[in-house]
Image: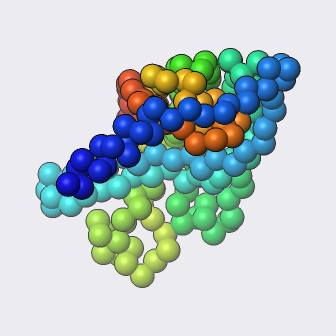
């Protein structure tokens, strides 16, 4: 019975009509944002069978993004600063994070590139008992990772659900609605230790 009720609610949501304000006179939309970049590289040790969790030492980014006519856009951001204690405990990470998007009412395409150099082991005390009473972590300054990705989201009923409103805020959906969504994503990650 719950499955039938859930299906009916889901079905009704995909057929609801929404009022969507596309801001047709706004050629340029600019927004400020805060973003928390990050990446985990989880490995399992062959010797001890323990999970080893490598992470870059990053802070939140503050940035500005722009969109031209709600169709194409990008963003640039600046890295937050680390405290001296954090640099000593986890090391420093150099990183880049580039994002480009195309927004249409029926599809969004995201192209991403991230590069990190300098990692630490988050669970250092589980890997080496000498780190149990220390805030310091095992660090690998030359460890690097690059990630390339493409993400695509399709909307089956763009008059009922606005991707630009939900994902980019270049439109405003003023009433509830819904649509089936389909996604396609791919990424390629390369890591190494020089």
* Residue 71 seen from this side: yes
Q: Where does the image place residue 63, in percent across and percent down from the top left?
A: 75, 41
Which residue extends farthest bottom? 133
- Quadrant for residue 173, please give it: top right
Q: How many marks?
A: 0
Q: Where does the image place residue 101, in percent across and percent down from the top left?
A: 61, 23
78 vs 73: above or below: below
- Quadrant for residue 133, please give it: bottom left
Specify the quadrant that holds the C terminus: top left
| Residue at x 24%, y 55% (from the top left corner) | 2
Q: Nearer the viewer, residue 161 or 44?
A: 161
Q: Where does the image place residue 54, in percent across and percent down from the top left?
A: 39, 52
Q: Nearer the viewer, residue 114 or 63?
A: 63
176 vs 14: above or below: below
- Quadrant for residue 21, please give it: top right
Left or right of 55 in this view: 71? right
Q: Where does the image place residue 155, in percent across and percent down from the top left?
A: 48, 24
Q: Nearer the viewer, residue 74 or 54?
A: 74
| Residue at x 44%, y 34% (from the top left corner) | 14
Specify the quadrant that holds the N terminus: bottom left
- Its colouring scheme is rainbow
| Residue at x 80%, y 20% (from the top left corner) | 24
* Residue 152 seen from this side: no
| Residue at x 30%, y 56% (from the top left corner) | 52
């Amino acid at each position: 019975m719950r499955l039938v009720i859930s299906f009916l609610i889901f079905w009704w949501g995909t057929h609801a009509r929404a009022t969507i304000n596309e801001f047709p006179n706004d050629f340029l939309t600019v927004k400020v944002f805060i973003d928390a970049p990050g990446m985990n590289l989880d490995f399992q040790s062959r010797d001890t069978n323990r999970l080893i969790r490598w992470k870059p030492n990053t802070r939140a980014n503050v940035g500005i993004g722009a969109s031209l006519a709600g169709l194409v856009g990008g963003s640039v951001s600046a890295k937050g600063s680390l405290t001296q204690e954090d640099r000593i405990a986890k090391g420093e990470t150099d990183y880049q994070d580039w994002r480009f998007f195309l927004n249409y009412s029926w599809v969004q395409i995201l192209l991403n590139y991230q590069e990190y150099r300098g990692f630490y082991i988050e669970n250092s005390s589980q890997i080496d008992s000498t780190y149990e009473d220390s805030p310091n972590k095992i660090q690998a300054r030359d460890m690097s990772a690059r990630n390339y990705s493409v993400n695509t989201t399709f909307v089956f009923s763009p008059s009922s659900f606005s991707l630009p409103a939900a994902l980019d805020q270049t439109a405003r959906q003023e009433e509830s609605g819904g649509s089936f969504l389909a996604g396609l994503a791919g990424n390629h990650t390369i890591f190494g230790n020089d």
